[in-house]
Amino acid sequence: MSPSQWQLWMKRSFRWLSAWSDSHREWILAGAAVILLRIWFAALGIVAVLYGASADPWGQGNMFFGVGKISAEGFGVFLAPWQRWDAIWYQQIASVGYSAGNASGSFFPLFPILMRRVGTILGGNLVLAGVVICTIATFFAFVLLHRLSTQAGDRAAANRAVIYWAVFPTSFYLFGGYAESLLAACALATIYFARRKNWCIVGVAAGAATLTRPVGVLVVIPAVIEALSQNDTWHRRAKMILPLLLGVALGMGAWMLYLHLTYNDALLWVHAEESWKRVFIFPGQTILLTARYIVEARDYLANNIVDLALTGLVFGSIVAGARKLPLSYTAYALAMLVVPLASYALVGSFAAMPMAAGGRRAMVVLPAFIVLGQLIRGRWLQPTWMMLSLSLQAVLFFEFARWMWVD
């Protein structure tokens, strides 16, 4: 290639890259956010591991349920902080499968299946597999949130929505060992492609969400509303909804058939909740109990304060933005808030936390961040909000890595 041809090729490549970046800025923002957060959590995790993290903080001797513990040496120092709490359950399931004798059935299968497949490629390192899967899923979730936010507002508000989600106090659960990032990506894909009327992809995404977490089935709500809002005949609306319902039914059907054939219990995922002694109550009672425990300064005060505050923040955002959001977004957000609050576990420390995991669940009520991106702006308010949120995120992740925080 001659110098003149090389220069011409470079100019064309630069023009193409410039045009692509102008029309795909959400990809650049998502990539930058993921990279920066990976560096941020790596630094916090190393400090936590080197200064205070314990492999067996309460001397129970069973924190890892028999799975291989990542050594906090060499490259392992980047992975060890993510091998905590529910991440260990997923690792155990990916390694040896489910068991009818413990609570493993509470954890839905898509994430551990992917961990097992990716882990095979990565030499059997299931913790690294979980981190890789979560990172990729989070990237696509950021892209989809940006696109949905742009439809509901403008590009600047969409940028803020992604950033506010990235720095949300419990967003570190998106980056390793937990299924929240996969759930978020599947839920956002369901809504996004429903609005684009690509119902085959909607069916696949909704089925995947259903197989990721029990609340994943709630993506049916916004998808059905989007279908019914189309200015079309009822016959055509029914044809739109069919792939959605088929995807969810096939997903749950395959999951329950596997449980029946393997454990002779198609409802193992329901019966596993008995291990947690879960009771069902009115959602308002859960909130009132949490407020009462805070006033009485009972055990796990910090957990109750964070869970109540973050749930209240997300609920307030949805209420404030109800007129700005499509009905499908609002209905989905309220369902994602209310359904988990209709029960709580009575086992051990969970009995003292009626809204246990409320902060983590609030983090995946995705329409709330579209509203926050529209409302929180300005020269002083935006950086102040980000600093407060990021500071609490740092504290929570540091304590999570030290086994002192679970949500």
Image (cartoon, rainbow, N blue to C red):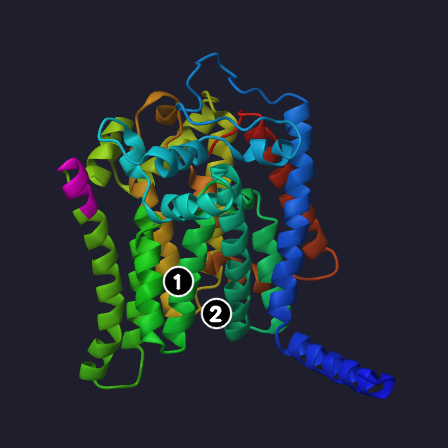
Quarter of the picture containing the N terminus is: bottom right
Q: Exactly how many numbered labels are in the figure?
A: 2
Q: CA distance from mark 1 to mark 2?
A: 10 Å
**Residue in the image at 60% along x and 68% along y:** 26
The residue that label 1 is drawn on is: 330
Outermost front residue: 1
Please give left or right for residue 327 compared with residue 132 in the image: left
Residue 268, above or below 292: below
The local secondary structure at tag 2 comes to: loop
Residue 394, above or below 297: below
Q: Is residue 20 visible?
A: yes
The residue that label 2 is drawn on is: 324
Alpha-carbon neighbours of circle 2 within 10 Å: few (<14), some, or many (≥20)? some
**Residue in the image at 68% along x and 24% along y:** 50
Residue type at mark 2 is Lys
Q: Quadrant of residue 153?
A: bottom right
User: Is residue 245 located in the magenta-colored stretch of the structure?
Assistant: no
**Residue in the image at 68% along x and 45% along y:** 39
Q: Is residue 376 visible?
A: no
Please give left or right for residue 54 compared with residue 258 in the image: right
Please give left or right for residue 99 compared with residue 201 in the image: left
**Residue in the image at 30% along x and 33% along y:** 104
Please give left or right for residue 14 compared with residue 28 in the image: right
Mainly helix, strand or loop, the magenta region? helix
Q: Position of residue 137 (x, y in %)?
A: 49, 55
